[in-house]
């Protein structure tokens, strides 16, 4: 490990913490806001997994990678999804080629000036971050895949696998030789998952898939490196939300009644710092909103089936993404 740099501010907020080598040539950084980014050193270059959202942290990350891998080019930046916390920092890692699921490309190609303004405005309570976000440049994927892709460089194998669940683009990076899984936002450790674009049944399948890989280490989209048992907790969280929303739905409660009725129960799952409480509660409500529509659809389908009627079961995708993670 290279020389240690001390964090000069609140770690995880504007902190610049030191990288951690979790396998030979496989690094992550757990000190940045928005995601836990990583990189894999190969003999031919570096493969990055996700990019930090806050410019100061993205620049710090680039400096740390260059310090670790002097003279190696950046081969690819893999975005596990299109959310700001994973992909907004792409611009700081050029030249390289961004690769992600086809749907991530569709979403990111649609990030307009209005989106940039919303990102800027979402930091109005943190001016030291906000003033850095005046030159946002979106770098959508140059290469896309739909089911899976493999990056085979310098003796390394990096499998990119679409699982969905958290978003219709969510994909993981699996290193079969090192048994390391970069799980993206399929896995959250000790944090409320962001569910506004979720397909919860697909998400539960995704968690099971990750468990079945039997990784030695999981790098979650948010939080520290963990082991496969953590996936159970995420699954319980999602199942609990589904069950409670179904209870409310069956009691005849409206979507808004369900959201305000359940936010308190959900927030207790994980400790939330007071300064983030309002934001987390609104994030939980957007998840409840999504799950309510899923449950409503499931219940309507079941009722229709009972009467012998066939309904289509697609969910539209108009959810608010103001606070996406
Ligand atoms: Zn995400």
Image: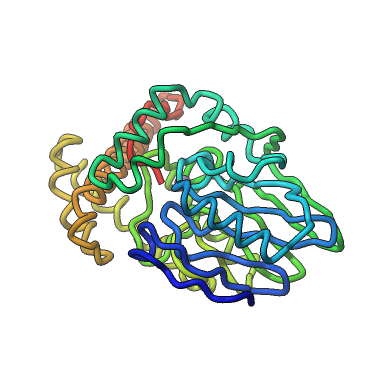
Q: In this rendering, is residue 140 above or below 325?
A: above
Q: Is residue 100 left or right of residue 276?
A: right
Q: Nearer the viewer, residue 208 or 141?
A: 141
How many labels were placed on the picture? Answer: 0
Who's the residue at 31% across and 44% down the image?
287
Q: Nearer the viewer, residue 273 or 7?
A: 7
Q: Nearer the viewer, residue 188 or 130?
A: 130
Who's the residue at 26% across and 51% down the image?
280
Q: Is residue 1 left or right of residue 244?
A: right
Q: Nearer the viewer, residue 290 or 55?
A: 55
Q: Position of residue 303 (x, y in %)?
A: 32, 33
Picture quadrant of residue 264: bottom left
Q: Is residue 303 left or right of residue 140?
A: left
Who's the residue at 64% across and 34% down the image?
141
Who's the residue at 75% across and 61% down the image?
70
The colour scheme applied to this rendered structure is rainbow
Q: Position of residue 18 (x, y in %)?
A: 52, 70
Q: In this rendering, is residue 305 above or below 130?
A: above
Q: Position of residue 320 (x, y in %)?
A: 33, 32
Q: Position of residue 139 (x, y in %)?
A: 59, 33
Q: Quadrant of the N terminus?
A: bottom right
């Amino acid at each position: 490990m290279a020389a240690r740099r001390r964090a000069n501010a609140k770690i995880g907020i504007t902190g610049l913490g030191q990288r951690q080598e979790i396998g030979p040539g496989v690094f992550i950084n757990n000190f940045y806001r928005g995601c836990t980014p990583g990189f894999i050193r190969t003999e031919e270059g570096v493969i990055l997994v996700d990019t930090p959202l806050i410019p100061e942290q993205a620049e710090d990350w680039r400096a740390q990678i260059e310090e670790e891998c002097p003279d190696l080019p950046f081969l690819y930046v893999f975005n596990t999804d299109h959310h700001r916390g994973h992909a907004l920092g792409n611009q700081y890692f050029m030249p390289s080629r961004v690769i992600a699921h086809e749907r991530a490309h569709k979403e990111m190609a649609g990030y307009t000036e209005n989106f940039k303004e919303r990102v800027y405005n979402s930091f109005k309570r943190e001016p030291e971050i906000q003033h850095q976000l005046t030159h946002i440049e979106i770098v959508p994927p140059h290469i896309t895949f739909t089911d899976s892709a493999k990056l085979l460089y310098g003796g390394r194998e990096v499998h990119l696998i679409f699982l969905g669940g958290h978003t219709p683009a969510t994909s993981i990076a699996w290193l079969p030789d090192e048994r390391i899984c970069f799980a993206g936002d399929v896995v959250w450790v000790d944090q409320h998952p962001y569910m506004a674009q979720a397909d919860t049944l697909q998400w539960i399948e995704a968690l099971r898939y990750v468990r079945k890989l039997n990784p030695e280490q999981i790098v979650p989209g948010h939080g520290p490196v963990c082991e496969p048992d953590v996936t159970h907790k995420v699954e319980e969280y999602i199942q609990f939300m589904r069950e409670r929303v179904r209870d409310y739905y069956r009691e005849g409660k409206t979507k808004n009644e369900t959201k305000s009725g359940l936010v308190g129960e959900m927030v207790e799952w994980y400790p939330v710092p007071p300064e983030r409480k309002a934001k987390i509660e609104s994030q939980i409500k957007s998840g409840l909103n999504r799950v309510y529509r899923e449950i409503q659809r499931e219940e309507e389908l079941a009722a229709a089936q009972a009467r012998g009627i066939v309904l289509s079961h697609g969910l539209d995708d108009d959810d608010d993404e103001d606070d996406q993670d």
